[in-house]
């Protein structure tokens, strides 16, 4: 039962979060920042484009940087 | 969003997933038992249809701002993941998605598995392989078609695009009875990644309360900006990859070899 629950959780994690959890976390933070700025009556349309501009290169850099031998 | 852009986005996303599902069903049918694989395929299509019938009206009942916030966020996460993979493949940091290789692997695994009959299914392995493959690949298709259609108040057009993609790919699969290796899947994934990221950015910001300068007119600008960023990253990573591997041949940058 626990193994099935774990499998179920792993499937949804893989489906929604994917290979890089930091991208998903960055998107959530950017959405929250957009909402916060909007509530403070500050133009907020630029937050998500900036987030994409930062998150995509950052995620690619993490994927392509050489792995340290002791990290494996 | 124009009807054409909605149709294209949903069609391409669904076609990519349909190619992957077709490869799995072909492997199950060829290596094991066509009847069981086809039963698995139809059982999976019924499961997906039930999901659409259950989720479609539920999504329509969610207030538009909340829907755009949640859907925009999810599309943005999906889009960035697709784009990340497509850029890594286009720049040579990750192997190209090769349907023929996947087909050969699935075929070998299917041939090695033992035969087992359950109920009216003569080969349980072929049934579950086809069922799981189609449901897993189809879930993302259902999500994309439903959310694009609901957001744009044009669920029939989104459903038609999804249906057309599945029919075209399935017909091609039946015609060749072989993995659809010639489909430019990596290029399609790159385009879909750009579109999901752009639409996710646009809808997510609107859902969180932001107003875009020029309203809907800014969406094509966002699409273009994401595409330019993605191409620039491919070019940069290719150069970095080439520098670390001096013998690597120079390949011209174009969508066809992404």
Image (cartoon, rainbow, N blue to C red):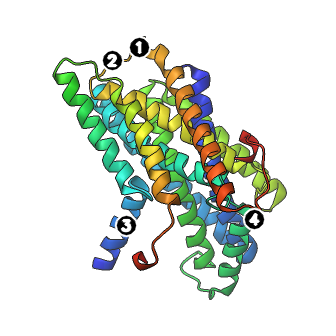
* Mark 1: secondary structure: helix
Residue B185 % position (x, y): 69, 50
* Marks 4 and 3 in Cβ contact (< 8 Å): no
Say which of B121 and B96 sits in front. Answer: B96
Q: Which mark is residue B73?
A: none
User: Which of the two marks, 4 or 2, is nearer to us in this view?
Assistant: 2
Residue B146 % position (x, y): 46, 38
Q: Is residue B233 left or right of residue A5?
A: right
Q: Which residue is mark 1?
A: B215
Q: Which residue is mark 3?
A: A10
* Mark 2: secondary structure: loop
Say which of B80 and A10 sits in front. Answer: B80
Q: Which of pointers 1 and 4 lies earlier in the amino acid sequence?
A: 4
Same subunit: marks 3 and 1: no
Residue A45 % position (x, y): 34, 23
Q: Is residue B254 visible?
A: yes
User: Which corner quadrant of the image does residue B89 belong to?
Assistant: bottom right
Chain for mark 4? B
| Local crowd size for mark 4, using a 10 Å CA cut-off: few (<14), some (14–19), many (≥20) | some
Q: Is residue B50 left or right of residue B256?
A: left
Q: Which mark is residue B100?
A: 4
Say which of B166 and B253 sits in front. Answer: B253
Chain for mark 2? B
- Seen in the picture, residue A18 relative to B145 is either above or below; the reply is below
- Mark 3–mark 2 distance (CA, rounded to whole Å): 36 Å
* Marks 2 and 1 in Cβ contact (< 8 Å): yes
Toward the top, the furthest residue is B214
* Marks 1 and 4 in Cβ contact (< 8 Å): no
* Mark 3: secondary structure: helix
Chain for mark 3? A
- Mark 1–mark 4 distance (CA, rounded to whole Å): 44 Å
């Amino acid at each position: 039962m626990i193994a099935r629950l774990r499998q179920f959780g792993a499937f949804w994690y893989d489906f929604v979060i994917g290979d890089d959890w930091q991208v998903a976390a960055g998107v959530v933070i950017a959405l929250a920042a957009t909402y916060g700025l909007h509530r403070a009556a500050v133009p907020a349309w630029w937050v998500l484009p900036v987030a994409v501009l930062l998150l995509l290169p950052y995620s690619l850099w993490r994927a392509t940087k050489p792995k340290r031998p002791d990290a494996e | 969003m124009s009807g054409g852009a909605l149709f294209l986005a949903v069609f391409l996303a669904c076609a990519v997933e349909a190619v992957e599902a077709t490869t799995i069903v072909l492997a199950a049918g060829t290596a094991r038992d066509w009847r069981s694989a086809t039963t698995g395929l139809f059982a999976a299509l019924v499961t997906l249809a039930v999901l659409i019938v259950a989720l479609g009206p539920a999504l329509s009942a969610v207030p538009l701002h909340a829907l755009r916030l949640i859907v925009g966020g999810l599309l943005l996460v999906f889009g960035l993941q697709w784009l990340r993979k497509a850029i890594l493949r286009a720049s040579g940091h990750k192997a190209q998605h090769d349907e023929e290789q996947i087909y050969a692997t699935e075929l070998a695994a299917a041939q090695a598995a033992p035969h087992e009959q359950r109920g009216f299914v003569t080969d349980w392995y072929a049934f579950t392989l086809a069922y799981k493959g189609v449901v897993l690949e189809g879930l993302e298709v259902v999500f994309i078609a439903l959310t694009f259609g609901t957001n744009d108040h044009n669920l029939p057009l989104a459903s038609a695009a999804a249906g057309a993609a599945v029919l075209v790919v399935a017909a091609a699969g039946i015609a060749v009875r072989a993995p659809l290796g010639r489909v430019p899947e990596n290029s399609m994934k790159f385009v879909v990644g750009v579109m999901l990221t752009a639409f996710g950015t646009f809808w997510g910001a609107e859902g969180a309360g932001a107003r875009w300068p020029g309203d809907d007119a800014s969406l094509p600008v966002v699409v273009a900006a994401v595409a330019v960023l993605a191409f620039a990253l491919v070019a940069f990573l290719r150069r970095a990859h080439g520098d670390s591997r001096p013998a690597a041949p120079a390949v011209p940058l174009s969508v066809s070899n992404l």
